[in-house]
Amino acid sequence: MYVIVVGGGKVGFYLTQSLLSDGHEVLLIERDSAKVDSFNEQLGSVTIAGDGAEASTLAAAGAARADVVVAVTGEDEDNLVICQMAKQKFHVGRTIARVNNPKNEQLFRVLGIDVTVSQTNYILHIIEQAIPERSFVHLLSLTHGDLAIVEAKITDHSAVVHRSIGEISLPENTAISAISRGPRLIVPTPATELLPGDDIIALAHREQEDELRRLLV
Amino acid sequence: MGCGRVGARIAAILDHNRHQVTVVDIDSRSFRRLPADFSGDTIIGTGIDEDVLRSAGIERAGAFIAVTNGDNRNIMAAQVARLIFEVPEVVCRIYDPVREDSYRRLGLTTVCPTTTVSAIILDHVMRANEDSSHRPGGS
């Protein structure tokens, strides 16, 4: 697979290194030529100097035959235009943009970016998981189908405590996938009763996530 | 959006012609370029932020003009204005002719100073060239 990475910050550098070690063909585009020299010393000649939003730079990088373009600069407007130019001028099949301001995640999708990665949201969710006594935690966003994996803790006050899965009417587009009860992992059946202290792992469409939260917590 | 020389001038002219104008810029010092009798509003912030645009009253704006120094910032703000807020008239300055061409094709109203100014200068030079060739003794 041929991957073009734009933006040689920490994310761009380590992503390039990791893709290279997986055996992919990778080219990194970085604006600062001093950085380019240092990267080429460390990674071999895989970095070129240039502005990834300029068509001439993308053309020189061989964007026309790239399978994926990843824009991971620190500026959202640059990442947006890099991906749009890659799509519009070079018909790149898959564009991935880093979103620095979480507010822009939805906008980028409306504007045609295939995959958005919001590092702020990721860090937020990871920290949320590490804080004890949180009753409802967003574990992971799945870009595919706008799904989220969430974790909810059943307490004595939950509306669904001591009820069986079959009795609960779950919101549309949500499913309880597993129950973690002490050391045991339970694959739920309609007869499974929810007990205080149960950790529920559920799948939810993003739009139903809040509804599921209200039901379980 | 963008209170440089061009942005400040456009804002001043529109204000002078009794339009209601709000100028957005990330640097409050830029507003010094506005004339002393400017009666419009100024907002400090980036025009690629929907909340900043909302506080600038974009939901009832008849036109949105993106003239910061950054092509990509102008492009992103113009798309937000057009697609999210459905502003009837959106104009976007793009210095890079290739990017300008791409986004014009995508339906944005774009102005490219690079091609426009080059054409004007070339026109002057070519006319001067023609004049000198008609001059007696000219070659």
Image (cartoon, grey):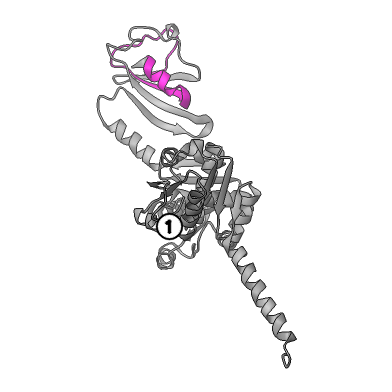
**Residue A194 counted in the magenta span:** yes
**Residue lying farthest left?**
A132
Q: Secondary structure at mark 1?
A: loop
Q: Front-most of A182 and B83?
A: B83
Q: Front-most of A143 and B45?
A: B45
Q: Quadrant of residue B129?
A: bottom right
Q: Front-most of B43 and A128?
A: B43
Q: Is residue A124 shown above or below A22? A: above
Q: Is residue A1 visible?
A: no
Q: Is residue B32 visible?
A: yes
Q: Is residue A174 shown above or below A114? A: above
- The spot of residue A2 in percent (x, y) is 56, 53
- The spot of residue A191 in percent (x, y) is 42, 7
- The spot of residue A102 in percent (x, y) is 41, 39
Residue at screen point 61% across, 48% down: B108
| Badge count | 1
Side (left or right) of B127 relative to A10: right
Q: Is residue A36 shown above or below A68? A: below
- The spot of residue A27 in percent (x, y) is 51, 58
The quarter of the picture where the C terminus of chain A appears is: top left
Q: Front-most of A177 and A171?
A: A171
Protein chain holding label 1? A
Label 1 CA crowd tier, 10 Å (few <14, some 14–19, many 20+): many
Q: Which residue is the site of mark 1?
A: A8
Q: Which residues are magenta?
A: A186-215
**Residue B33 counted in the magenta span:** no
Q: Is residue A114 shown above or below B10? A: above
Residue at screen point 38% across, 56% down: B30
Q: Quadrant of residue B122?
A: bottom right
Q: Amino acid at mark 1?
A: Gly
